[in-house]
Image (tube, helix red, strand yellow):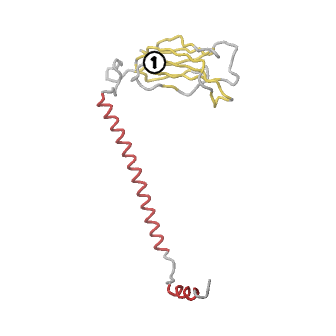
Amino acid sequence: MNDNAQPALDRLLEEIPVRPAPIGELLVAGRAARRRRRRATITGIAAATALVLAGGVTSVQFLQSSGAPLGPADGAASTGDGAVATHTLTVRSTLADLPLAYTEGALIEVAVVPAAPDAGAPRGGDPVEVGSTMSWTDLTAGSYLITVATRPCHGNCDYLDPPTDSCQRTIDLTSNTEVLVTIRWAEPCAITDVSTR
């Protein structure tokens, strides 16, 4: 710094007012900013909720106006009070006496899919051990495709290989029904013994 600048800096230092920091003002401004941010977040959440609700209402109105059935499928049996009669489908599994086995074990996967495209969503579950019995309740009368597949364990049964050794069969569900699935390692399974109760 040269000698000419020093007097100018001294003069500026004397002209600048020195006072205590405005901590109170800063705290008030910070609280106001926090309230604005909280208000904006709540407004955003409320707007998103309103959009989701409006989308749901619009979807239902569209389905009603397009003529898509929202109630039971045509031909579904109903009870005397207007409720739709439902049935239970039970799938038992057994292992055929074969010398071959998956070294790390295997589970089976069962899915039940309505044959009619508008009859509802497919139903399945987590893979289970062979010998398990699975039941699906509240099924309306109609045709259902039962698909069974073996899922070999990959290292352990927390990790499964893709489905293999599969089989499928369409059944007409008119009352409570039980089917038997015979699992054969490295061969397609078989769905047999359809019995009604």
Residue displayed at 58% across by 87% down? 6
Residue displayed at 50% across by 11% down? 194
In depth, the one of 39 and 5 nearer the eye is 5
Q: Quadrant of the N terminus?
A: bottom right
* Residue 160 placement (x, y as % from top left): 62, 28
In depth, the one of 18 and 106 nearer the eye is 18
7 on left or right of 64: right
How many dots with numbers? 1
Q: Quadrant of residue 28?
A: bottom left
Question: Is disc 1 placed on a helix, strand or loop?
Answer: strand
Q: Quadrant of residue 129?
A: top right
Residue behind mark 1: 144
Say above or below: 196 vs 114. Answer: above
* Residue 153 placement (x, y as % from top left): 65, 26
Say above or below: 35 vs 189. Answer: below
Q: Tell me the kind of residue under disc 1.
A: Tyr
66 on left or right of 48: left
